[in-house]
Image: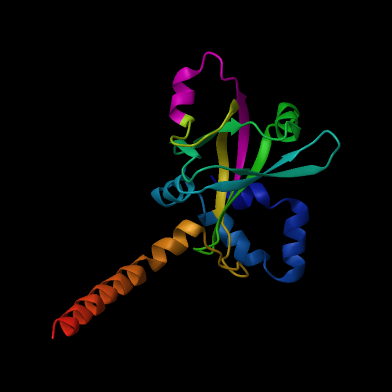
């Protein structure tokens, strides 16, 4: 997998040359081959609660859609394949329709708290729920209310990490609660000490 070789078309290379970055990226193209997802990417993907998917329509416009669910709803099947259960939504079917005509998609996965973003080129495959019970059981999220319409598998062609520059850190409610938990425990401990001291003073 070499993201740069796939992403850098002739037009892009010309722009890099004009702006003085071509030599650095040319070296990167020669050295950035990776055979499948590593443990780092697998862990990152497995903990996402959303991602963005770009598909290409017959109207010759790209379409970007947000896909969300519980943390871990994106399942890593192997080091070159990830998949999701496609939940029922607004029933416009733009992404699914685009994929039926052109299965090439781009995925963008964010962690605002870590200031990290992973970009992926993939070939998408829509899988009917019928007669694919084993795959559905592998992909379905647990303890989450949803109505499935289909499954989508993504065969990863290339991926790369973006620079964290200009990502504003944002935190989920769960992340904030986890960060504040030690403080809450400390406050509770102090309150217990105060109650104990007040009781001792009252007994005098």
Give the quarter of the image for residue 134: top left
Identify the residue at image location x=57%, y=35%.
154
In the depicted view, which residue is nearer to us: 61 or 179? Answer: 179
The residue shown at (61%, 53%) is 4
Quarter of the image that includes the C terminus: bottom left
Q: Position of residue 35 (x, y in %)?
A: 46, 43
Residue 172 vs residue 46, the one in the foreground? 172
Q: Between 157 and 15, which is closer to the camera in this rendering? A: 157
Q: Is residue 73 magenta?
A: no
The spot of residue 179 in percent (x, y) is 40, 66
Q: In this view, does 107 lie above or below 31?
A: above
Residue 199 sits in quarter: bottom left
Compared across the picture, whether 52 is left or right of 198 comes to: right
Q: Nearer the viewer, residue 80 or 113?
A: 113
136 displayed left or right of 104: left
Whether 128 is among the magenta residues is yes
> Farthest right residue?
59
User: Position of 133 compared to 2: left or right?
Assistant: left
Residue depicted at x 59% and y 47%: 51
In this rendering, the answer to whether 126 lies above or below 80 is above
Q: Residue at x 57, y 45 (%)?
A: 158
Please provide percent x and percent y for residue 191: 29, 75
In the figure, 94 relative to 25: above or below?
Answer: above
Span of residues in magenta: 120-138
């Amino acid at each position: 997998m070499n993201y740069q070789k796939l992403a850098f078309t002739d037009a892009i290379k010309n722009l890099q040359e004009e702006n003085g970055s071509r030599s650095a990226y040319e070296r990167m193209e020669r050295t950035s081959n990776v055979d499948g997802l590593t443990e780092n990417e697998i862990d990152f993907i497995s903990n996402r609660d959303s991602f963005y998917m770009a598909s290409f329509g017959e109207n010759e416009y790209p379409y970007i859609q947000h896909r969300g669910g519980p943390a871990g709803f994106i399942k890593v099947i192997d080091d070159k394949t990830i998949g999701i259960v496609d939940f029922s939504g607004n029933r416009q079917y733009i992404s699914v329709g685009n994929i039926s005509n052109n299965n090439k998609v781009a995925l963008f996965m964010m962690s605002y708290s870590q200031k990290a973003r992973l970009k992926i080129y993939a070939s998408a495959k829509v899988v009917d729920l019928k007669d694919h019970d084993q795959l559905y059981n592998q992909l379905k999220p647990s303890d989450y209310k949803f109505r499935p319409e289909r499954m989508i598998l993504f065969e990863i062609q290339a991926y790369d990490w973006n620079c964290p520059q200009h990502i504003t850190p944002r935190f989920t409610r769960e992340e904030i609660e986890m960060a504040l938990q030690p403080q809450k425990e400390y406050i509770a401990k102090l309150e217990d000490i105060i109650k104990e001291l007040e009781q001792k003073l009252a007994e005098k």
